[in-house]
């Protein structure tokens, strides 16, 4: 989960690499580095910390050169430090790497025996020494073919060479890699986002491929070295979304954008004239599907879990949900009549991609719900449902979560209607409710002031719990995840009905507990569970919906009310105050909200 950039040009590339690295910081930011070729020798500058620090160091050394590679790191092998930062260079080559080399220990032993001296604790350095070794007896192309045969694991590589004045080699196995075409210069990037400020013309490497990039030409090869042709794709331009505008943080902007992103997504999918949902060219008949398997990681997994409740409620399909890292290594019973749905904002998450790949290899029906339509998961699934919410830059996922839930809900009611699991009238009612969703989310954003006044209790407490039943349970998990990843406080999401089976022991006097209880079919049961935690001293923040009926309970610490909507859509409305709770808790603690520690936007390691 690191960011790679490479540029070969007829002018100095240092500042362009720095600009691209800034864009890639969402992938990792514990250390950074850059190497260029200047006057026939490789020079590098590296540091622990962010690109800002790297830039200051570069200004001191005045690094120049017309070909170069840069890297932002999210540590896997070895602590974040200057020594472990990429690039890793020998006299002859310099390498940046994203991913993990699984056989690095064995390869290192062999190379040490041959006299190579290692400086870092990383697995990457093995690649540097390995190519250096092969280049003694082979040309560049054959050296690359040979190292790709030797390396086990998943990786994306960018390499420059002392003796090849304008060449960058890119190679991909498992981790994504894009190349970009510019005027008298060409680029390499771990995603197209890194290249967007320089070009909108890109190609993507497929698994096992490598490329030789020169400033006026790019050649692509398969793992055996046979030339392959590539389509040049044009990226859409929506630069405004890459700007924070008046906001202090992307996360705040992205939370507030949700009414618009919901509206955009609804406009994309709902056919207002025919009151239908447009899902064109879906490759399978709904009668050929009897079960659905939803797969994702982190927040995306929570949207899958949410969808399980909807699919079970509204369709007759068998539904299961899986965490991608578990699914891909279990003994799965693949079912021909199952639809496998992969949910991922970035479309690059290694585990989700691995699960998709496994299903594709078993010839399953694969469909993805993604935000980044140019991503590996989108490209390799048989059908794609974009969430249309624009770039999400804040590392913690907010508008993409809402977008994923929306698209999964649309898919659910579309399938329910085609299978005649719900009547046309019920379908129409659901479409009608969806049309008001954007406005209702706007109202949920107004809970901001109440949230700001109570977040101190969450950051000062030893820990907190988030409880919900049914439709509110996945949202409770998501609320707890947001608080822990941003405010670095312990928070746990739990099904409210499970508390009495052990976790009630955690409730102490004054412990903040969020209870999600919109007035749906679970409401009364959840309120009973809420009373159980209040009786043990919890300070309860109840999130429910506006109603003329009072909540039948005493000693509730705080209540936040969202608008009324249909049962299915409450999850969208109760999510928003929880996003704000996490945001303001982190803000009060002075943390780096858009780049929380130990998390990256695109988790491209297993
Ligand atoms: C949490 C968060 C992560 C991601 C997870 C999957 O806020 O951002 O939990 O949801 O890493 O990422 P995608 O959706 O890109 O597959």
Image: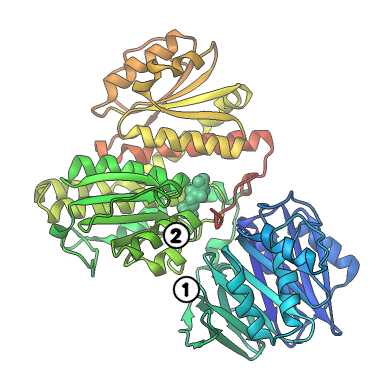
Element assignment for label 1: loop
Left or right position of 591 against 470: right
Residue 358 position in % (x across, y down): 38, 60
Label 1 sits on residue: 236
Measured Cα–Cα span from mark 1 to mark 2: 23 Å
Q: Nearer the viewer, residue 1 or 514?
A: 1
Q: Residue at x 32, y 54 (%)?
A: 407
Element assignment for label 2: helix
Image height check: is 486 above or below 91? above
* Circle 2 crowding by C-alpha within 10 Å: few under 14, some 14–19, many from 20: many
Residue 26 image-quadrant placement:
bottom right
Residue 299 position in % (x across, y down): 45, 45
Q: Are marks 1 and 2 in contact (CB under 8 Å)?
A: no
Q: Nearer the viewer, residue 121 or 600?
A: 121
Please tell me which of labels 1 and 2 falls first in the chain.
1
Image height check: is 180 above or below 115? below
Mark 2: C-beta under 8 Å from nearest atom of ligand 1? no
Left or right position of 452 against 297: right
Label 2 sits on residue: 353
**Which of the two discs, 1 and 2, sits closer to the camera?**
2
Left or right position of 365 against 344: left
Residue 523 position in % (x across, y down): 28, 24
Residue 139 position in % (x across, y down): 69, 87
Residue 195 visible in image: no
């Amino acid at each position: 989960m690191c960011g790679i950039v490479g540029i070969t040009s007829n002018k100095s590339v240092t500042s362009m690499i720095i600009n691209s690295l800034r864009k890639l910081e969402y992938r990792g930011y514990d250390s950074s580095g850059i190497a260029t070729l200047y006057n026939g020798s490789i020079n590098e500058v590296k540091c622990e910390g962010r690109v800002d620090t790297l830039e200051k160091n570069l200004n001191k050394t005045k690094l120049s050169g017309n070909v170069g590679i840069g890297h932002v790191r999210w540590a896997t092998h070895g602590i974040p430090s200057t020594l472990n930062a990429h690039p890793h260079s020998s006299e002859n080559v310099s390498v940046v790497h994203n991913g993990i080399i699984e056989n690095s220990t064995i390869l290192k032993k062999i190379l040490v025996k041959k006299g190579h001296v290692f400086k870092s604790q990383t697995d990457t350095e093995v690649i540097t020494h390995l190519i250096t070794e092969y280049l003694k007896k082979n040309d560049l192309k054959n050296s690359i073919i040979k190292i790709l045969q030797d390396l086990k694991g998943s990786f994306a590589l960018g390499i420059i060479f002392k003796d090849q004045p304008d060449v960058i080699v890119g190679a991909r196995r498992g981790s994504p890699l894009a190349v970009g075409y510019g005027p008298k210069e060409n680029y390499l990037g771990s995603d197209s986002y890194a290249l967007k400020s320089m070009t909108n013309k890109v190609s993507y490497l497929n698994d096992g491929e490598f490329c030789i990039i020169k400033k006026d030409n790019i050649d692509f090869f398969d793992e055996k070295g046979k030339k392959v042709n590539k389509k040049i794709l044009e990226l859409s331009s929506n630069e405004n979304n890459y700007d924070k505008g008046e906001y202090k943080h992307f996360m705040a902007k992205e939370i507030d954008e949700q009414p618009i992103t919901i509206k955009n997504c609804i406009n994309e999918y709902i056919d207002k004239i025919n009151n239908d949902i447009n899902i064109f060219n879906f490759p399978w008949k709904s009668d050929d599907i009897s079960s659905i398997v939803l797969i994702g990681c982190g927040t995306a997994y929570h949207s899958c879990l949410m969808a399980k409740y909807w699919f079970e409620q509204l369709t007759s399909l068998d539904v299961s949900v899986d965490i991608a890292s578990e699914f891909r290594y279990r003994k799965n019973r693949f079912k021909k009549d199952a639809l496998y749905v992969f949910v991922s904002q970035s479309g690059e998450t290694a585990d989700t991609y691995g699960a998709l790949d496994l299903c594709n290899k078993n010839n399953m029906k694969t469909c993805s719900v993604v935000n980044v339509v140019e991503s590996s998961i989108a490209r390799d699934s048989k059908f794609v449902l974009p969430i249309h919410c624009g770039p999400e830059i804040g590392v913690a996922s907010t508008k993409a979560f809402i977008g994923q839930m929306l698209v999964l809900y649309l898919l659910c009611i579309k399938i329910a209607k085609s299978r005649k699991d719900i009547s046309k009238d019920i379908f129409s009612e659901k479409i009608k409710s969806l049309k008001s969703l954007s406005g209702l989310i706007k109202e949920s954003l107004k809970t901001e002031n109440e949230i700001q006044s109570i977040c101190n209790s969450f950051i000062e407490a030893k820990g907190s719990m988030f409880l919900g039943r049914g439709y509110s349970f996945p949202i409770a998990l998501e609320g707890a995840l947001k608080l822990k990843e941003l405010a670095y406080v312990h928070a746990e999401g739990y099904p409210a009905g499970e508390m009495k089976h052990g976790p009630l022991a955690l409730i102490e006097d004054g412990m903040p507990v969020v209870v999600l209880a919109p007035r749906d079919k679970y409401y009364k049961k959840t309120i009973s569970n809420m009373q159980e935690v209040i009786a043990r001293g919890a300070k309860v923040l109840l999130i429910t919906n506006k109603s003329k009926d009072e909540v039948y309970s005493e000693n509730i610490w705080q209540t936040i009310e969202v608008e009324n909507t249909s049962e299915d859509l409450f999850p969208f409305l109760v999510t928003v105050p929880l996003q704000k709770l996490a945001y303001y808790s982190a803000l009060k603690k002075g943390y780096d909200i858009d780049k929380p520690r130990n998390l990256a936007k695109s988790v491209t390691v297993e």
